[in-house]
Amino acid sequence: MLGSTRFFNQYLLLTVATSFLMGNNASLAMESSEESKRGSDSYHTPLKTKTMQEELSQTPGFVVAQKQSNLFSRDKFVQIFGEKDIKILDEVVDWEAFSNKSMPFDAPERRNSLRFIRKFLGDNSSLSDEADTLYPDMLKLEDQTKRAHLDRMKEITKQYFGVENNQVVFPMKQAGDQLGTRIQINFEGQEPITYHVKTHSAGLKSAMSSAAKILDPKELVVYKILENFNIGCESHFFGRDFDNFYIATKDASNSGDVFLTYGKIRDQKKLQTSLIGNLQELIDNTEQNPNNEAQDFMESMMCLDLLGRILRLTDFQTNPTNFGFLKDKFQLKAVDFRMQQGIVYEVNEDHWGGFLRGNGDFEYSDADAYMLYALKERSKEARFETAKNVFQRLFFDFERVLRDSQESAVKSLNNIANTQNEPLDGRKKNLKEAIEKYISTLRHNFEFFASKLNG
C-alpha cells in the first residue's frame, strides 16, 4: 500500500491550483504568494543606457586591461632583459594584444600570452632588480584579474535583480568548482532572499585555470525542468554574453524551512530515522510493508533516479551533497547536477534494462543502504510499481514542464542578445536549435519510460 506521499501530493495541489488560476503558465506559482511577486520572469538584464566607452571606463576589467597594457609592453621587457633575451617571448607572445588598449583583459590573445610571460618571469626574475620587481607586480595583477571576474559577476547580478549596493550583501561563496558568489538581497518589507550565483558549467572556474567556453543550453533546460517539477529551486539566467553567462538559484532554505543535504541528514541518526520511517526494518525483513515515511523516501529516491536517467544527468542523485530535504516538511530538493557529455541523449532498451537492474548508468552498489534498497535491492516488481506511481503523480504533465522550460531557456538567450546589441547570428541560432533538439529528445525519453511502465 502506498504511503502519504507528502511531496507528490503537495506538487499536485500546486499544479492544479496554478492551472486553474493561470492556465498553462503554472511554473511561477510554485513559490508562496509573497515570493511569486518576484519570480524568475520578473527580472532581466537591463538595456544599455551608456555608451560602450563610458561603460568600459567604469569597470574593474577595464582598469585591469590598462594595467596589463602598461606592465607587459615589449619596450619595457627589452629595457629590462635586452633584445636578445626576449626573442624567445617574441615567438609565443602577442605583444600587440597588450598594446591594443581597447582589448578586454580576458581576451584569449592576452590569456595565452600571459602563460608564457609568467613562466619567463619566474625563470628570470633574479637577473636584475627591475626583473625582480616585475614578477611580484605580475602576481599582484593576476589577483586583480581574478577579482575583476568576480566583481563583474556581482555587478551584472545586481543589475539583473535591479538592486543597489545598500540592498545587497555578498557572503562568502560555499565550496564549488565554478566561479561564483552568493548574494543576499534585502527587499523592503520582506525577509532577505539569498541566491547562489555561478558561471555555467563550461564557464570560468574558481581557479581561473582555463578560459570560459560557450554555454551548454541543455543545462538551462534542466534547471527549469527541476524548478517546474517543484524539485529544484527558483532559477535565473543572465550575463554579458554567451561565454560569461551566469546561473542564479534561490537558496533552498529561503522557503521558510531549513534545507539539509542528504549527506548531512545521514550524519544525524534521529533525523534520518524520521526521514526513512521503517526502512531499516524492511531491509532486516522484520517488517513487510513500508509505512508512510518509508514510502515517501523510496518515491523521492525513485524520482531522482528517473530524472537522472531521462534528463541524462550525472553527479545528481549519486552525490549526497547535491540533493536533500527541507527539515520540517521532508520535501525533496535537488540543488546541483552535471550534464553527461559525449553521449547519445536518447534512451533505448539498454537504458530500460539498466533501470530494471537498478544500475545501468548509475552504480548504486556504492550507495548507502537505504538508497541501495530503494533503487536496487528491492524486487523488480516493487521498484516498477514505485516508478509507475512517480510518473502518475509527478510526471503526468511533463509536456507542460518541457514547454515552459524551453520557453524560459530561450527567453534568457534573447535577453542576452538584446542587451549586448549582438546580431542574431549563427551562434544564437545554434543555441536555440540545441535546446529544441534536447527538448525533443526529452519528450521521447519521458514517453519511452511512460510506455514501458504502463505497458
Image (spheres, rainbow, N blue to C red):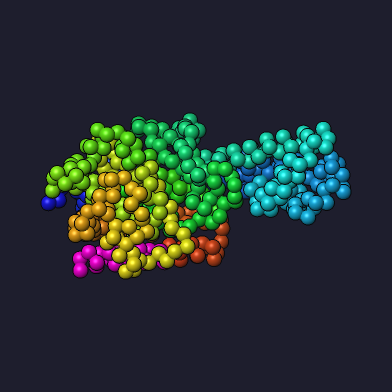
User: Which residue appears at 60% of the width and 51% of the height?
Assistant: 211
Residue 435, percent from left and from top: 43, 62
Q: Nearer the viewer, residue 93 or 168?
A: 93
**Per the image, is 451 magenta?**
yes
- Above or below: residue 281 compared with residue 302: above
Direction from residue 187 to residue 304 in the image, left or right: left
Whether residue 257 is visible: no
**Per the image, is 205 magenta?**
no
Residue 392 falls in which quadrant of the image?
bottom left
Direction from residue 330 to residue 406 in the image, left or right: right
Whether residue 272 is visible: yes
User: Which residue appears at 40% of the width and 37% of the height?
Assistant: 194
Residue 74, percent from left and from top: 81, 47
Q: Nearer the viewer, residue 373 or 337?
A: 373
Residue 415, percent from left and from top: 48, 54
Main secondary-structure element of the magenta-colored stretch: helix
Residue 40, percent from left and from top: 38, 47
**Mark count:** 0
User: Which residue appears at 61% of the width and 44% of the height?
Assistant: 55
- Above or below: residue 448 compared with residue 153: below
Q: Give the residues drawn in magenta, as a range.
A: 437-455
User: Which residue appears at 54% of the width and 42% of the height?
Assistant: 206
Q: Nearer the viewer, residue 167 or 284?
A: 284
Quadrant of the snapshot with the C terminus: bottom left
